[in-house]
Image (cartoon, helix red, strand yellow):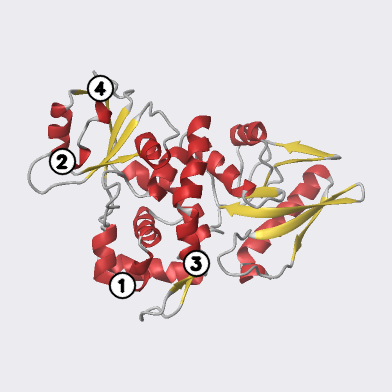
Amino acid sequence: MYKGDTQLLENLGQALTALKRTTGIDGHVLPFEPLPENELRPDAVITITVDGKTYQYLVEAKTRIDRFAALVHLKAQLERFHQPGLLFANYITPALADRCRELDMQFLDDAGNAFLRAPGLYVFVTGQKPTRAATDVRGTGTATAQRVVFALLCEPTLLNAPYREIVDAAGVALGAIGWVFDDLFKRRFITGTRGGTQRHFLQPVQMFEEWVTNYPIKLRPKLNARRFRAENPEWWREARIQDFGGHWGGEVAADRLTGYLRPATQTIYLERKETGDPITKLVGKHRLVADPRGNVEILDAFWKLPANPEQPDIVPPILAYADLAATLDPRNIEVAKLVREKHIDNALRQA
């Protein structure tokens, strides 16, 4: 059985039993052969049988979904299978279910809530209450783990670097590195020797997908976000953001990576300094006014990695993609796909 993830398979079996209870539809979890390493992999495969016709789905499993924004990224993940995909979670609230239906994203949860749509098949069930507490079938991780995984994805050579180098790159405590690696080994995202220098990525694409999904929930809220508005809406075009230890994220980064987006918002990741306050200098220099609804957002930078010499004033493409994916703006989602195609996918394949 793929991955040997018995907890996930057990949860899926229980969900299909609940679906049978709520709709009378039969479903089964299928055994299947592993794909070659580094290929896009589903978490499981299931079939749904209605009136003698069988529908097969590739499953993307998440423990819980806390925000509408995560659904947009999850839909993009499912579309990359190029086969019917299904989101599986512990519980899909009625509001999330409605949003999934609007996005035409099929789903199933433990309680038997479901949205299934295909020729000859239409199921939409909401309001069934979950029967168990969430069990982490996909390791959502912590803010600390998010920092470490981000560093590894951006700089794959760190996978076999001394722990001290990873600490410096990720900005975490030394004791955290071991348990993050243990989790990555346990879930077969990496392989090799825990204490040696022969570690390898097994599933860099899946690591990236999970990181992007969890970033707006686990790490971004801890980055001390502050909002401002600018008197000059074009201020960012000439701003020398590096002079303040800053990096453009979000729409500005996407514009510089693709040239296909006219930024309406400006996201800045600012490095903390032991002396002086860079945000005060930045705000004063460019006459930014505090405004909780402003279109300028400043967050703490959470990494220390070598900058791209060709574009040293923007964040790593993975973070630019995550910023865009966390919005519900269709134009951002389209540009996020371009960022991924041009600057992320090939690097993940080579990791």
Horizontal side of 311 relative to 322 (left or right) equals left
Q: Earlier in the sequence, mark 2 or mark 1?
A: 1
x then y, percent, for residue 11:
65, 58
Work out whether residue 6 or residue 189 is closer to the camera in this orientation and state it.
Answer: 189
Horizontal side of 95 relative to 319 (left or right) equals right
Q: Earlier in the sequence, mark 4 or mark 1?
A: 1
Identify the residue shown where x is 30% and y is 32%. 297
Query: Could you say which disc has been placed on residue 178 in the image?
Result: none
Q: Secondary structure at mark 4?
A: strand
Q: How many marks?
A: 4
Work out whether residue 345 or residue 210 is closer to the camera in this orientation and state it.
Answer: 345
Horizontal side of 92 relative to 136 (left or right) equals right
**Label 1 Cα crowd, 10 Å radius (few <14 / some 14-19 / many 20+):** some
Question: Mark 4 = which residue?
Answer: 230
Question: Mark 2 = which residue?
Answer: 243
Identify the residue shown where x is 74% and y is 36%. 124
Q: Is residue 45 above or below residue 163?
A: above
Identify the amino acid type marked 4: Ala
Identify the amino acid type marked 3: Phe
Q: Nearer the viewer, mark 4 or mark 3?
A: 4
x then y, percent, for residue 193:
42, 80
Question: Mark 3 = which residue?
Answer: 189
Q: Earlier in the sequence, mark 4 or mark 3?
A: 3
